[in-house]
Image (spheres, grey):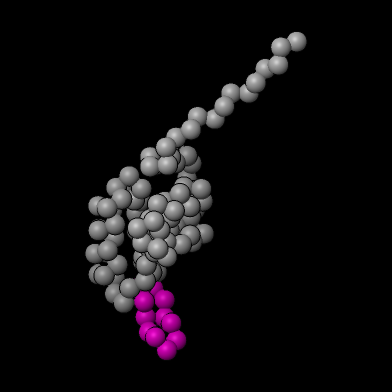
Amino acid sequence: KPKIEPPKAKETPASKPAPQTGEGRVYIQLGSYRDVAGAKKDWGKLQKKYPDFLGKMTIKTEKINIPGKGVYYRLQAGKATEARAKEICAVLKKSNPGGCILVKR
């Protein structure tokens, strides 16, 4: 009997975004700001810089009061699958180290 090999997975270049399949529950936290206006301003810059990765995402800000430091607003983009969120963060961290963490909802 001839041995039948399973088809090999198609390789895609790392520079191209992978298609997102299904609705995800993961947000990407891109920064923390003293006011909502600062978060929205940076969001606009990030969307322009990374349109293939952030262009279709929506943002939300999460208000947090840090004792001794005051109120901050976390800039989060989503929703994505965990795999897609990790891929996006890997790309963003290359030019902005530490500027991307996953937030699961």
Main SS of residues in magenta: strand
69 up-or-down from 11: above or below: below
When asked about the image quadrant of residue 2, the answer is top right
74 up-or-down from 79: above or below: below
* Residue 10 part of the magenta segment: no
56 up-or-down from 13: above or below: below
Residue at the location (29% across, 60% down)? Answer: 43
Q: 87 left or right of 72?
A: right
Residue at the location (57% across, 27% down)? Answer: 8
Q: Position of residue 99 (x, y in %)?
A: 39, 64
* Residue 71 part of the magenta segment: yes
Q: Position of residue 42 (x, y in %)?
A: 27, 63
Between 104 and 12, the one nearer to me in the picture: 12
Between 3 and 45, the one nearer to me in the picture: 3
Q: Position of residue 22 (x, y in %)?
A: 48, 41
Between 61 and 86, the one nearer to me in the picture: 86
Image quadrant occupied by the N terminus: top right
Magenta residues, start to end? 63-73
Residue at the bottom extreme?
Answer: 68
| Number of marks in the rendered image | 0
- Is residue 79 among the parts visible in the rendering? no
- Is residue 104 among the parts visible in the rendering? yes
